[in-house]
Image (spheres, rainbow, N blue to C red):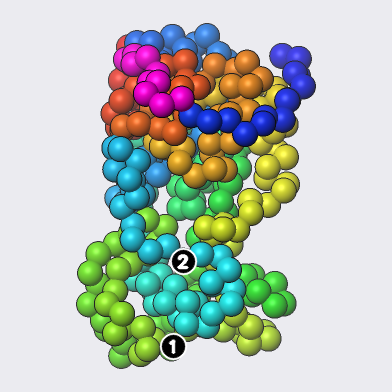
Amino acid sequence: MASRPLIRIPQMRAVAGVEAPVAGPAELREFLHAHPRLLVLTGAGLSTSSGIPAYRDGDGRWLRRDPILYQDFIASERMRRRYWARSFFGWQVMREARPNAGHLALVSLERAGRVSLLVTQNVDGLHARAGSRRLVELHGCLNRVACLDCKTAIRRDDLQRQLEDLNPDWQPEVLGYNPDGDAELDASAYPGFRPPACGRCGGALKPEVVFFGEPVPADRVQRVRSALAGSDAVLVLGSSLVVMSGYRIVREAARAGLPVVAVNQGRTRADELLSFKLNGNCVEVLEKAASL
């Protein structure tokens, strides 16, 4: 398919009260067959079937109370201590998660030559573990950590062992689990936790993920735009599109004249831009579409 020029989109306002037409698995199957070069955008809803908590409810309301902002993480040792204390427990959930039928269905589509690019907002690494290769992890992946000073990289599993050695007797109560390898702890637990440091220079460590308030790396943005120019449609799976980095992709696709379809539980920020949407668990919907 010939590439089309991608028009940069001016700021748009959602049209209040406009909802996308609702369809079913049969219409999704027809859409998949009619558009052989799909850019697929996935969100947290695809990984809930793997046991990873979602960010939002069906109305798009935030389920997590207090995410750490990028500037706070960079500037505050206290915030870094809080992050790694919670990650100490939350990482175990992420490490034990396994790709589900939705991840595997997208691998099959890619191997059939029907996926121009798979773009995920998730940082759980499950698409890569399932076997997807035409993949952009828009917000990075939790299994990689790097020093903010000397840039030395370390595997998250290796860091976990260091954290265990640093905190052998630290056993606070875990109040719950959040998305992105985060656990809920009482505020009194943080002072007793010893955070990690770079083994090479002693600098602060940060997971190689995009925090709230941190820009997506330019090379990832450019790769998505290049793929979008060679695609003939966009399929959104399990995302409310509230985060701007995902919503921007849908806006650019709509402006370029590409049909956009979403499978999600509840509303999306881009309902007025969709050709149609399917309400429900995106893994179950994909399975039904594949069986028709």
Q: Is residue 141 above or below residue 189?
A: above
The answer to whether residue 55 of the structure is visible from this angle is yes
Comparing labels 2 and 1, the label whose residue is closer to the camera: 2
Is residue 265 or residue 271 the one in the foreground?
Answer: 271
* Residue designated by label 1: 194
Q: Position of residue 65 (x, y in %)?
A: 33, 61
User: Is residue 19 shown in magenta?
Assistant: yes
User: Does 195 sit left or right of 92 as displayed?
Assistant: right
Camera-nearest residue between 195 and 65: 65
Q: At 45% from the left edge and 53% from the top edge, which residue is drawn? A: 124
Give the residue type that dot 2 points to. Ile
Indicate the position of residue 274 as horizontal and vertical percent values.
47, 20
Which residue lies under the disc numbered 2? 68
Please tell me whether mark 2 sits on a helix, a strand or a loop.
Answer: loop
Give the quadrant of residue 22.
top left
Q: Is residue 115 visible?
A: no
Observer-nearest of 288 and 227: 227
Q: Secondary structure at mark 1?
A: loop
Q: Is residue 247 above or below residue 219?
A: above
**Which amino acid does the dot numbered 1 rest on?**
Arg
Secondary structure of the magenta portion, mostly?
loop
Q: Residue at x 62, y 34 (%)?
A: 11
- Quarter of the image for the C terminus: give it: top left
